[in-house]
Image (spheres, helix red, strand yellow):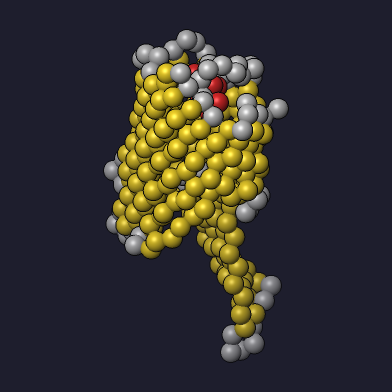
Amino acid sequence: MASLSFIDGDWSEFPIVGARYKYYFSPVADNEQPYDLQSHLGRNSWLKVDLNALNSNPNLAGKLYFSQRWSLEADFSYQHKTHKDSYTDRNGALKTSKYQEDELLTDLVLNYAVSQQLTLGIGIHNYSENSEYTDIIDDYVESNNSQYDSDTLIAIKARYTSINGGKGLDIASSISHNEERITAKVFTTFYIAKHNAYKAGVVYSDFSDDWNNETLLTISLAHHYWFSHTTAIKYGISWIRVDGNNFGLLDINGTWRF
């Protein structure tokens, strides 16, 4: 499956604006189940690559079903940031301050299908950051400092799917926690027909240590409509609150399977 994402927040830590390619290792059967759920209910293993047009950073994810009940999920999201500030001091020297940051978000989860409707999973959620600060006077490097931080959380996931005749409910939730950070996510999809669904999502994250206290809350609503087994559109809005600041996001996503 290939997916072209014009603007797609996707309720993730690193929003995607660009292209997405998703490959299934076995054919996805077209049956009476909702188009959006056919790969999940059919237990089709897949691999996904995202290319973020905002910063050309790739993301890689996949899911492997290796028995009737067990599956393994992996998600790797990478982001590189660079900030450079130059000015001339009162003595005429050109001063440049350069900051570079590499962030890697890693999710590894082992899932077990308790029943046809309920799947439980446990794994880790790791966030690592490597930053470098450089001060340059003319062509002379005055100082260069680097710092590496890594934060690992235990993650618990649950997914409940109840579909009858192409209609029903799909709820995916997760919570990850350690002594400094807690993140909770709940995504609910209401299928009113095989080709038609409404989605709602809530993400809450709180991080605090001796120096910082950061809070994130995202509430999203979307409509997902499939024109056929191969073509779909998803559009919606998100309200995001970060440390007391509010802003909105428009989500638009087009999908073409081949």
Residue 220: x and y, percent? 42, 46
The outermost residue toward the bottom is 90
Q: Residue shown at 38%/30% (left/top)?
A: 171
Q: Residue shown at 49%/55% (left/top)?
A: 249
> Relative to residue 173, is residue 73 drawn left or right?
right
Image quarter of the N terminus? top right
Q: How many numbered marks have been drawn onto this rendered protein structure?
A: 0
Looking at the image, can residue 59 be seen?
no
> Relative to residue 123, is residue 20 drawn left or right?
right
Please tell me which residue lies in front, 171 or 23.
Answer: 171
Residue 95: x and y, percent? 61, 77
Please tell me which residue lies in front, 20 or 166.
Answer: 166
Q: Residue shown at 34%/36% (left/top)?
A: 175
Image quarter of the C terminus? top right
Looking at the image, can residue 56 be seen?
yes
Q: Residue shown at 32%/39% (left/top)?
A: 177
Rendered view: 192 above or below 209: above
